[in-house]
């Protein structure tokens, strides 16, 4: 079967492309959990994991309420929808106490919602608001697809049986490290997204100019070998490397080493989807919290980039319109970046030379999310978008910004201006780091 046509961030009002993108996302969601048995669906109550049935119901609820309800004015297709599946109002711990209709019932709810959404797409032309809402729901499902993937990792389940994506292809053969810095001249820079160039989230707008001083940034993310040197040097035990908040987190959580790392002889193994394997030295460090990334930088005599520095290094533009991606405006292809779970897990940091930024930074998109030093705050001129008013605003101030996407991120979601955001203690996500010279 031929893969769906790439749709990228600019899906406009083409119902055919929207339908392909929506059905592709739903196939991916179902494949991410379809191999799990009923016992595996009974997820224990963990801090950063949701019950699988709740997660699936929430994905359907988003389309049910924020697409069908917003555009059609129709009531939810399941009883007490908001009481069960509204993420902003249903507290995390409560999600284990809800009366779900069971696996078959949730799958039926998903199917009925999808049927109604696809029927809506038969009405061309779509309004601008309808296009925006449909794309929002589509990309929201993609985000939860990545969440299902790192939830499987946290639970020690086997790797998901998904691969490839809308762009297809495999991992380039380049391997090994990619050391060194590139010099970024700095200057006036337009941070954020232009809504005229395709879909963007409210926290990416309004784009604004700021002055960035010259800086030097690593050509590649920090590798496992580089992070292992920090661990071996006693980095987790030396208070001087940690901020006050980071050290407090380390003590409360009794963190002594990276999550999913286990001693193996004189080195380390990495537990990937429940199976210990040799730690690959030249793959990027992943599953690292902001506090660990910050401590590593202090030990190494480096620092994390701000999100403005990161975006400038990715786009290479201090004047005029920015490209959507480090390589230009072409949609992501297999030689550009490790996205769409084309293979399970990270590639070496030397891979994907075809995605280099104009300054020579590699893997600015794909492989691992990269922590920045920036707190998640609104840009000047920020306006909350309907219908999902809780997407960004409630999280300003206590989250940190990550950039770039990971190997499990969908290529239609990620762009150089895309802002991800998590609390600094999160290390279950596919997060790594890239450093700057002091």
Image (cartoon, helix red, strand yellow):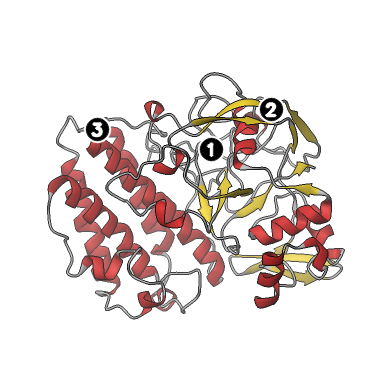
Mark 2 vs mark 3: give the one in front: 2
Q: Give percent across and percent down for residue 183.
A: 76, 29
Residue in the picture at 27% in, 64% down? 107
Q: Residues within 10 Å of mark 3 (few under 14, many from 20)?
A: few
Cβ atoms under marks 2 and 3 closer than 8 Å: no
Residue 260, located in which quarter of the rendered image?
A: bottom right
Residue in the picture at 70% in, 56% down? 293
The disc placed on residue 186 is 2
Residue in the picture at 64% in, 58% down? 290
Outermost residue toward the top? 320
Q: Reply above or below: 147 against 247.
A: above
**SS under mark 3:** helix
Q: Is residue 211 left or right of residue 387?
A: right
How far apart marks 3 and 1 lie (CA) works out to: 33 Å
Residue 406 in view (yes/no): no
How far apart marks 2 and 3 lie (CA) works out to: 37 Å
Q: Earlier in the sequence, mark 1 or mark 2?
A: 1
Residue in the picture at 12% in, 50% down? 73
Cβ atoms under marks 1 and 2 closer than 8 Å: no
In front of the other: 34 or 433: 433
Mark 3 vs mark 1: give the one in front: 3
Q: Earlier in the sequence, mark 3 or mark 1?
A: 3
Q: Can you identify the residue that label 3 sits on? A: 128
Q: Split into 4 quadrants, where in the image is the N terminus?
A: top left
Q: Can you identify the residue that label 1 sits on? A: 169
Q: Give percent across and percent down for residue 79.
A: 17, 69
Q: Reply above or below: 212 against 247.
A: above
């Amino acid at each position: 079967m031929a893969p769906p046509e790439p749709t990228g961030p600019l899906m406009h009002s083409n119902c055919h492309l929207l339908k392909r993108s929506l059905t592709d996302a739903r196939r991916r969601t179902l494949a991410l959990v379809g191999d799990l048995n009923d016992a595996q669906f009974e997820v224990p109550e963990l801090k950063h994991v949701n019950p699988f049935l709740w997660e699936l119901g929430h994905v359907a609820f988003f389309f049910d309420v924020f697409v069908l309800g917003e555009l059609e004015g129709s009531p939810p297709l399941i009883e007490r929808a908001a009481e069960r599946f509204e993420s902003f109002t249903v507290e995390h711990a409560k999600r284990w106490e809800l009366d779900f209709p069971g696996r078959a019932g949730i799958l039926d709810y998903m199917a009925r919602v999808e049927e109604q959404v696809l029927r809506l797409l038969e009405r061309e032309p779509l309004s601008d608001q309808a296009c925006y809402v449909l794309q929002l729901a589509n990309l929201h499902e993609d985000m939860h697809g990545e969440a299902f993937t790192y939830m499987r990792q946290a639970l020690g389940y086997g790797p998901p049986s998904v691969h490839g994506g809308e762009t297809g292809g495999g991992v380039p053969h380049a391997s090994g490290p990619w050391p060194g810095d590139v010099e970024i001249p700095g200057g006036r820079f337009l941070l954020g997204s232009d809504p005229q160039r395709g879909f963007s989230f409210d926290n990416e707008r309004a784009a604004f100019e700021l002055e960035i001083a010259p800086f030097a940034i690593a050509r590649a993310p920090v590798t496992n070998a580089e992070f292992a040197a920090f661990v071996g040097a006693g980095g987790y035990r030396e208070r001087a490397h940690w901020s006050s908040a980071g050290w407090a987190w380390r003590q409360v959580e009794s963190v002594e080493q990276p999550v999913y790392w286990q001693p193996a002889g004189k080195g380390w193994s990495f537990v990937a989807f429940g199976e210990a394997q040799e730690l690959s030295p030249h793959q990027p460090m992943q599953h690292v919290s902001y506090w660990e990334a910050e401590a590593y930088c202090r030990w190494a005599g480096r620092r994390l980039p701000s999100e403005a520095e990161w975006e400038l290094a990715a786009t290479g533009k201090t004047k005029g319109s920015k490209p959507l991606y480090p390589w230009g405006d072409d949609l992501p292809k297999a030689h550009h970046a490790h996205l769409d779970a084309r293979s399970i897990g990270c590639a070496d940091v030397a891979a994907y030379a075809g995605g280099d930024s104009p300054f020579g930074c590699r893997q600015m998109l794909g492989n691992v999310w990269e922590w920045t030093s920036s707190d998640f705050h609104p840009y000047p001129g920020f306006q909350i978008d309907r219908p999902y008013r809780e997407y960004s605003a409630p999280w300003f101030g206590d989250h940190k910004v990550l950039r770039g996407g990971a190997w499990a991120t969908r290529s239609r979601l990620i762009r150089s201006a895309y802002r991800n955001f998590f609390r600094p203690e999160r290390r279950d996500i596919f997060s790594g780091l890239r450093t700057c010279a002091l």
